[in-house]
Image (cartoon, rainbow, N blue to C red):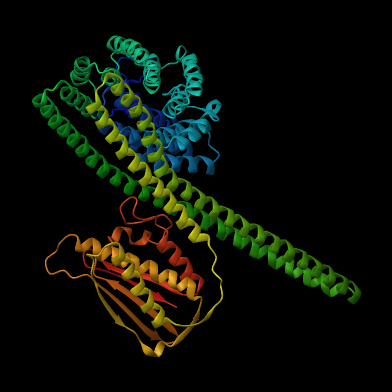
Amino acid sequence: MKHFKKISVVIFLLTGVILTNAQDNPIAGLKNKLSNTNSDTAKAYILDSLSMYYMFYSNNYDSSFYYANQSVNNAFLINDKKYLVLAYARIGFYYFNRSQYNAGLNISLKGLQLAEQYKITDFNATLYYNISFIYNNLNDSALSMQNAFKGLEFISDNKDLFFDIPLHLFQLINNNYSDGGNFDSALLFLHKMDSVVTSSKERAAKDISYYCWSEFYLDKMDYHGADSVTALGIASCKQNGDFLIKTFYTYQAISYFNQRRYKETITAAKSVLEVNGIYIAGEATALEYIQASYNKLGNIDSAYFYLKAADSVRNVVQNQSNIQETQQQVFSAELSKKEADANIVLEKEKSRSKLITYIFLTALIFFLLFGFIQWRNNLQKKKANVLLMSEKEKVETTLSELKSTQAQLIQSEKMASLGELTAGIAHEIQNPLNFVNNFSEVNKEMITELKEEIDKGNYDEAKIIANDIEVNEEKINHHGKRADSIVKGMLQHTRSSSGKKELTDINKLADEYLKFAYHGLRAKDKSFNAALMTNYDESVGNINFVSEDISRVLLNIYNNAFYAVNEKAKQQIANYEPAITVTTKKINDKVEISIRDNGNGIPQKVVDKIFQPFYTTKPTGQGTGLGLSLSYDIIKAHGGQIKVNTKEGDFTEFLITI
């Protein structure tokens, strides 16, 4: 039995939000004001207003993006950082409403960085709201909550004229609590949200409240409560004309389906398709629920029809996403040029200021030097000696302070590096843990269904559910092993070797671990074969290094090479024979080790990332992204270099110089 859970529709929550005290259609009036104003401040706010009104009144995202871009241009033109921060906030809002989460996150973080640099707090709450919303849609509840609470710290400084930011921050917090099963905390913030609904200037504030309550009841599997609230939401949207009506019909369909009210599910889901709105992804979801309901009712022909319709809608959504991605890339390139031009102007101003300062200091130093010479010549030898002793003490004090400052800087760098590593570890481990938690939650629900089916005597259905539980348990085990692999990789990163260098035959070591890696793979897959070709320079002789560390590097690169040729062999390319070539040669006082495979190569766009911790080109679950990072650190510690030459679809060659 396929188990359906509620869907995430938060991204379209704001499409029906507009101010209650605005004109019926303010766009024409704003354009007229824009053409007649000479005030830079007024122009900045008019451009911002046009961008937002086009989004909310007309659902015209192209025009909304155009005026947001004009806001950026205007901010650069008048060199006003506050309005540039506001423009970044709006661009970020546009991107995450178009499901371009990376672009939205990057521009919002850039806005925060700019605000921090120039001590601007007017729009920080909006920027943190953007970031929290993005992480919520990326199912990263921890970061979503962290940024939502951070946004609440800037509420008193908020100058956002469009959004009731506290309302939406409370909504995000209760949504994250509800998704995590913390219903008591979710309920607390639901009430906090409702406390600001009555005074909110947003027309859809009440409908947002209905939306949050319906989602809360769905999370609790209180379908009676969910049905009551979605009915209120639908009635309110019909009266106010809000686009949230598609969301309410979708939630109604989910509730009915989970109650096995399949005919009513079909009616509710079809309503999603019939009402006006821009929630295209919701239409795909509605079609999936119609298809699933017809399946349950045994109407296979109708089920197949709606399955094909859902695929068509998903293709439309994907095409829109591709267009938006191109638009974002063009904007990013233009923005980079604007920032570069602004930096050039700033650098010229700094250079001019430095030149004036240097001239002044040169003149000052000349006169001070002249006066010092005159004063020194008039002093007695005894006073001169005292002065020299005093200067010596000052120099020693300064040197001591410089050493202390250097130690502090080194410690700061270490802490910054530790912070980056900790964030990477947390992010990588969180991914498989999310899978474990999600599949565990699904199994709990399916076990309840299993008991119900057994009680009813439906043993065939019970067996199907039991099989689904078994599949989920395999996935839990798989992702648990992924987390274990990541932890082991990190331990290997931190594990210290004996550190004892000794003379070692590099040719012998390279050959020994080549065969070790090959037979290790053969032990797992008897069908695998590869040609091993070696060309060892006998003049290399013995080299002084930590053999335990270098063997780690060789084994890791060998394993990657065998993996690459094995993957290419699976493609069954005509006349393809897997081959690994290992070469050593002496170059002056250094030794170069070449490890080359004829696998699929590495795409050029990711070559610069392969030595970064946690970056891997292997599919999810087959690599931790730590092997090459560890190898890079080891070779650097030996005073050597590790480089990669590759051609996609042809070969990869690692060059190690010691």
Task: Answer above or below: position of 80 versus 180.
Answer: below
Whether residue 516 sits left or right of residue 164 in the image: it is left
Left or right: residue 497 compared with residue 586: right
Which of the pair 245/338 is nearer the observer? Answer: 245
From the viewer's side, name the closer residue of 585 and 501: 501
Q: Which residue in the rendered view is the most extreme toward the bottom?
A: 539
Residue 517 percent coordinates (x, y): 35, 69
Tell me the quadrant of the picture where the C terminus can be found: bottom left
- Who's the residue at 37% across and 70% down the image? 643
Question: Residue 510: image x %, image y %?
Answer: 38, 77
Q: Which residue is at the far left? A: 301
Front-most of residues 182 and 488:
488
**Number of numbered labels in the structure image:** 0
**Residue 69 in view in this figure:** yes
The N terminus - image quarter: top left
Answer whether residue 53 is visible to the viewer in this image: no
In the rendered view, tell whether residue 600 sits above or below residue 13: below
Lateral position of residue 406 relative to residue 632, left or right: right
Q: Does residue 142 sit above or below 455 in this rendering?
A: below
Residue 156, given in percent of the width and then of the height, sits at 55, 26
Residue 23 in the image: above or below residue 317: above
Which residue shows up at 25% across the image and 18% down it? 260
Q: Quadrant of residue 296?
A: top left
Percent across and percent down for residue 293 are 19, 22
Dividing the picture into quadrants, the one containing residue 292 is top left
